[in-house]
Image (cartoon, helix red, strand yellow):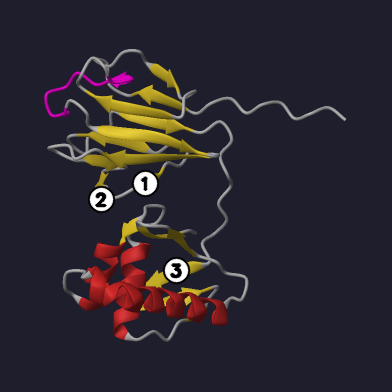
Amino acid sequence: MESPAPIPPARLVALQAELEPKVHLLKEDSYILGRFPSCQIIIPLPLVSRYHAKIERDGPRYLLSDMGSANGTFVNGRLIHSLHTLKDKDRIGLGSPKDLLCFLDPDPTLVPHSRLTYDKQRMVFLVQGQPLDLPKSQLQLLLHLYENIGSVCSRESCALALWGRAYNRDIDADALDKAVSSLRRQLREVAPEADLIETVRGIGYMLKL
């Protein structure tokens, strides 16, 4: 039996005329994007910080993060606040929402119709059409994760969504873990096969659809 052909690396394609080269093959484990000449991907634009953002490979995934830049990192016009798992045809902006780069995955995963949906008018989540009866705090937590699908939400941001106040590790760590575990349990009661919330150890949680 022939072994499967290796999957080629993902690519970043420049979307603006002033950016060169026009295509970056992401063959290495990590890349720094920024204005400084030592960056692996140089973006010579005034709104871009010297060391602006990083792309790291994690198995088949590519993770984008901001490196404390002055003006932020954007995906599809939205500012990211934590790790973002890049998806095929995601558009990246550095320093502004303007699209500078397009991420192309040579082996994109086909994403089926979402099992989880949110009815804004009724303010209720549905899993495979079944409504979730959630207390207000857990509704706010799930909505926070839902609004950041594919991105890691920090423990601090999840605590703020839950309780409306800053996270205190000494007081809140166990309570936050229990709240997320309870939310997972309620999701599985409606759809036993659902495993929608991923724990990113030491950082936070990510909703996967």
Q: Is residue 47 magenta?
A: yes
Q: Is residue 104 left or right of residue 193?
A: left
Please rate how many residues cluster around mark 2, counting C-alpha atoms within 10 Å: few if below 14, some from 14 to 19, many from 20.
Answer: some
Amino acid on which disc 1 is placed: His
Query: Height in image: 182 above or below 63?
Result: below
Q: Which residue is mark 3?
A: 117
Residue at the location (37% across, 64% down)?
Answer: 146
Number of other residues with Cα within 10 Å of mark 3, as a class: few under 14, some 14 to 19, many 20 or more: some
Percent x, y for residue 93?
A: 26, 35
Residue 81: which disc?
Answer: 2
In this image, 144 relative to 160: left or right?
right
Q: Residue 84, labelled with which disc?
A: 1
Depth order, front residue of 160/191: 160
Task: Please state which of the two labelled residues, at mark 3 or mark 1, is closer to the viewer.
Answer: 1
* Location of residue 130 in the rendering, given as x and y in whole percent from the top left corner: 52, 80
**Residue drawn 24% across the image and 21% down it:** 43
Q: Is residue 140 above or below residue 198?
A: below
Helix, strand or loop at mark 3: strand
Q: Which mark is residue 12?
A: none
The residue at the point 31 percent across, 27 percent down is 32
Measured in 3D between alpha carbons, the distance from the residue under mark 1 to the one under mark 2, in whole angstroms, is: 8 Å
Is residue 122 in sight in this rendering?
no
Q: Is residue 58 above or below residue 188?
A: above
Between the C-alphas of marks 3 and 1, the distance is: 20 Å
